[in-house]
Image (cartoon, rainbow, N blue to C red):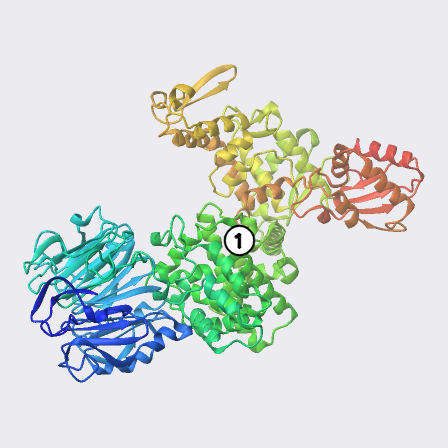
Amino acid sequence: MLCWGNASYGQLGMGGIDEEIVVEPRKCEFFHGKQVCDVGCGRRHTAFLLEDGTVYTCGCNDLGQLGHEKSRKKPVSNSLSFKFVLHNTSFAYPLQIVCQMYKSLRKVLTCMFLHLAYHVFQPVHCFLCTGGHVFSWGQNRYGQLGLGINGQSISTPQNIQSLQGIPFTQISTGGAHSFALTLSGAVFGWGRNKFGQLGLNDTNDRCFPTLLKSLRSQRVIYISCGEDHTAALTKLRGVFTFGAGGYGQLGHNSTNHEINPRKVFELMGNVVTQIACGRQHTLAFTPSSGKMDSFGLGGNGQLGTRSTCNRKSPAPVKGPWVASGCAAETDSEQGCCVKRIYAGGDQSFAHYCTANVSLDDVRIHDPHRRICTLNEDIIQKWLNHSPGRLPLEVSNEIDLVFSSASCLNGSFLSMSHPDHYSTSSKCSGVDMNMTRILFHRVIQQDHPEIAQQIAASLEKNLIPRLSSSPPDIEALRLYLTLPECPLFSDRNNYVTIAIPFAKALLSLKEAPLKVLGNWWSTFEPPVFQRLVELYKEVVVYLLQMHKVGIPSAEQRIFTCFLDTSLRLLEILHTVSERAGHIIQYDKFYIHELDDLIDIRNDYVTWIQRQMYPMGHDGVVTLCRYPFVFDAQAKTTLLQTDAVIQMQMAVDQAQMQNFSSMFLPAVESVNPCLILIVRRENIVGDTMEVLRKSKNVDYKKPLKVIFVGEEAVDAGGVRKEFFLLIMKELLDPKYGMFRYYEESRLIWFSNKTFEDFDLFNLIGVICGLAIYNLTIVELNFPVALYKKLLKRKPTLDDLKELMPDVGRSLQQLLDYTEDDLEETFCLNFTITEENYGATEVLELVPNGEDINVNKSNRQDFVNAYVDYVFNTSVAPLFECFYAGFHKVCGGKVLELFQPNELQAMVIGNTNYDWTELEKSTEYKGEYWADHPTIRLFWEVFHSLPLEKKKQFLLFLTGSDRIPILGMKSLKLVIQPTGGGEHYLPVAHTCFNLLDLPKYTSVETLREKLLQAIDHNQGFNLA
C-alpha cells in the first residue's frame, strides 16, 4: 500500500512518523504480507478491509469513528468483523468499506448490503442492498438523504422509495450530496447543489433523486464525490467533473465552478480506468501507461506531486508506477503495478502489487459488486441441488431476485450493439433472446419447486408492489422480460400472475406507457407475437370459464379480468399498427369467439351502450375491441347491423303507412326497395328508380323484379341482377374504366365522357350488394377498398394494378449507384395515352424542370402513386364513394381490413370442393350414399376448374364464394320427377338443385354440362 497526504492524525497508517504531511507516495510497511480488499477514507481517519474479513482502522478517534478506544497512527484490528458479508453464500459480495463517524453504524451492518458509501465530511450514510434497495440515514439539512424532505436528521436507515425498481451498481456520497449510478450508466443526484455539484445546470438543492440527463448518453460507469465536487468516469475513457472548482479540483485549468458536467480535456487520449475524489482533490489512473494524475488542493501533499501547491489541471503523481503487463521488481518500491486507488479527506492511497495480476478496472462491472441478477451461473447453482425441497439458501436467493424489480430490471442486459448503455426511450437495452433462454432454463419440469418459488415471489411480492409511475426508464424493463417467463403461459397462473401483471402495466401513467410502446415497436415479430398470443389465450380461457358458468358473486371480478386482458391487447394492436404492422392484423384475431360468445347479442348490447350510456355496469362487449374479430365474426356483425337497419327502415315505413290511413297528407311507402327492370335496359331502369329513392330507402330490403319473368325474389333474382348490371356498367363501351391487361384489373378512367352519376350508381350498387349480403363481380385492386376505408394506397397497390410500372419504380428506389439521374432520365412528370395522342402531365408544379435524383426519388414515387390513385380520378371516385356510403357507411364497415372488404364485395376464390361436398344437404330420398348422389360427386370432382365455377354460377348466381367460405353456401340437392331425359334445375334463390335420378355417369355428365351452359334467366317452371 502506498499512501500520501495529511498524516497529522495517523490517518495514513504509517505509524509514528515525524512528518505532518507526506508529499509523495510512500510505502506503508504495516500491510506487507496482508491481502487488502478495500479502503475507506474519512476526513481524518481511514479503515482497511482485508480478504479474511478483518477490519483495521487508524487516525482521529474523537467521535469513536475507529471502532476502538484510542486514536492510532498505526492500523489496529477492529472487533467488528465483515466475515458474514464475505462468506454468507446467499450474499457473497465484498463490501466497499466505510469510515465510521458514529459507533451506531454497527447496528445496520447486520443488513445484507452490497455497497455502502459514507459522507467523508458530514455524518450521512447510504447503502445499496443486494436486492437493489437504496437506504440512507444521517444529517439531512440539504435533502442529501433523498427522502423528499430536508432539515431533519434521521438516525435509522430509510428506503429511498423514489429509486424503487432501478438496477443500481454504485452509490457515492460527498459533503452534503449523494449520487447513485445504474447498471446502464444513468446518474441520479440529490442533496446540496450550491456549487453545481449535482450537474443540473443550476444551484438549487434537491431533496429527491434527480436524473442527470446530460450524462445519460455518456455511458458512465463510475462516479466519485468530493466535499463539493463530483467526478464521473465513462466507458469511453472520458472523465467529467462538475461542482466547486475553487482549488482546481475539476481539472479544467481554472478555479471556476461548473454547474454542468464538463470533460477534462487534458485527460483525453488516456484510457482512464479509475478515479477517486478526496475532499478537494481528484485522482485519475491510466494503467496502460502506468500514469496517475492528480489535481486540486495540494496543501497537505495529497496530490503526491512532491509539492504542496494546488494544481488546476492534471499533474502526474510522483510514484514508482509501471504500465500494466510489465513485470515489477520484488521487494522494491520500484515498479509498482497499481491495483486500486482511493482518496478521502486530504489523504490518498494506491493499492499496488509486485506481480503481474489483474488490475481493477471500474469500467468493467465486478460481478461481486452487483445487485443480484438472473444469469446462467446463478441458475446453474439453483439447479445443482437435488430435486425436492429447496434449501433455505437457494429459496431465499430465488425470492430475492423475483421479488425485486431492481434485480429483474438489471437482468438480461444486451451486450451487443446497441448495448444496454444505449438505453433510452427508444431502446430498452434488453436482450430478449437471452431473456427467453434463461427463463426457459430456470423453469424446468424436473425442478417444479423452483417454479413454485418463483411463482410465489411474483404473485405475492413483485407484482403487487409495481409502481404506476416508475422513476426511470430502466425500471420498465421487466414489463418486456417477464412475459417471456413460461409461468405466464401456464393456465394455472393466468389469474394469479398474467392478469395482475397486465393490470399493473395498464395502471402505468402515460409517459412510461409511451416508452413501453416504443420498446415494443422494436421487437422482432416472433417476440411480439408471443406476447399477443399470451393474452389472446388469457381471453379465450376467461370466455371458456364464462361459458361453463361463473357464480354471480364472481361476475364482477371476471369482467375486470376480461377487460384488463383486452385493453392490453388493444394497446399492443395500436403499437403494431403505428409501427407499420410488427405482425399482421390477422394475428390479433381470436378465431374461437364465434363458439364462445353470441356475437349478434354482443353487437346489440354494444349499440345499446352507445345509445344509452350506463357507466360502469359490469358488462364487457367484445365490439369495443374489434381488432380481435376475424372476417367471419365481422361478417356476422355486418349482417346483424344490416338486419337491424333494415328492420328500422321497415318499421319506419309501416309507421308512415299507418299514419297515412288517418292523415291524407302522409304518403304511404313500400317497406322494401323494389327494382323493376328490363334485361335489355337494366342500367337505365335502375338509375331511374334510384334517382327517385331517398337515402332511407337504401336501408330497406332489396327486391328485384325482371319484367316478363315470374320468379319470386328470395335472393337468387337479386344475385343475377347484381351480376348483370355490373357486367353492363363495366362494359368498355361506356369507357368509364380502364382495363389493365397484365393484372386483369380495372381502374377509373379519367378520360370518360359518361355522366358522373353513373359512378354514383356503381357506388350505390356495391353498397347494396354488401348490405344485402350478395357478392358481385368487380375486378378492382385492393386500392379501391383502401380508399373506401380512408386509407392511402401505396406502391404495393400500384404493383398490383400495373406490375411493370410498379417494378420499375421499385428499381428506382433500390438503385445504389451514383449515376441515378443519367440512368433513369426522369423528371416529375407522367406520360399518358389519350385517344392515340401522348400527353405529358406534371406530378408537381414545374415538374418538368425537376429531375429525379437520389434525394427526391421517394417523393417522385409518392407523387406517381398519388396521381394514379387519387389526383387523376378524384371527381370520379368522390361520386363512387358518395354512392357507396349512402348505403353502406357506419362503424361496422370500419372494422374491416381492405382485403376483407374486397372479399365481402366480390367474394373470394378460396375453393374447397371437398368442403362443398361435406356441407351439402339432401332432401327426399336422397342421402350422401345414394347411388345418384355418388355419381353426381364423381362427375363433379372430375370437371375442370372452369366448369366447376360455372356450376357455382348456375346454382348460386356467382362463381365466387362468400367470405365465410364454402360451408356458408349450404347447397341442397333434392330428387325430381320425370326421367333421365330431364335436365338438372337450379333454384338460385335457395341454392337448391333438382337432380333427376340418373343411373349412369355418362348421362349425368351430359345433362349437367348442358344445364350449366344455359343458365341465364329465371322461371318458375
Q: Quadrant of residue 300?
A: bottom left
Q: Residues within 10 Å of mark 1 (few under 14, many from 20)?
A: some
How many discs mark residues in the rendered view?
Answer: 1
Q: Is residue 424 visible?
A: no
Q: Position of residue 440 (x, y in %)?
A: 54, 61
Q: Height in image: 755 above or below 901?
A: above
Q: Residue furthest top?
A: 837
Return the residue nearer the eye: 269 or 528.
269
Residue at 37% x, 24% y: name it: 818
Q: Position of residue 924 (x, y in %)?
A: 88, 51
Q: Quadrant of residue 168?
A: bottom left
In the picture, measured across the screen, residue 460 lies left or right of residue 696, that is: left
User: Looking at numbered disc 1 in the image, what kind of residue is underneath it?
Assistant: Gln
Q: Quadrant of residue 548?
A: bottom right
Residue at 71% x, 38% y: name it: 958
Q: Position of residue 362 (x, y in %)?
A: 29, 58
Q: Quadrant of the C terminus?
A: top right
Q: Position of residue 861 (x, y in %)?
A: 43, 30
**Does dot 1 land on a helix, a strand or a loop?**
helix
Return the residue nearer the eye: 172 or 665.
172
Q: Is residue 289 visible?
A: yes
Return the residue nearer the eye: 373 or 739.
373
Return the residue nearer the eye: 121 or 1.
1
Residue at 60% x, 68% y: name it: 446
Residue at 75% x, 47% y: name it: 915
Q: Quadrant of the N terminus?
A: bottom left
- The residue indicated by pointer 1 is 529
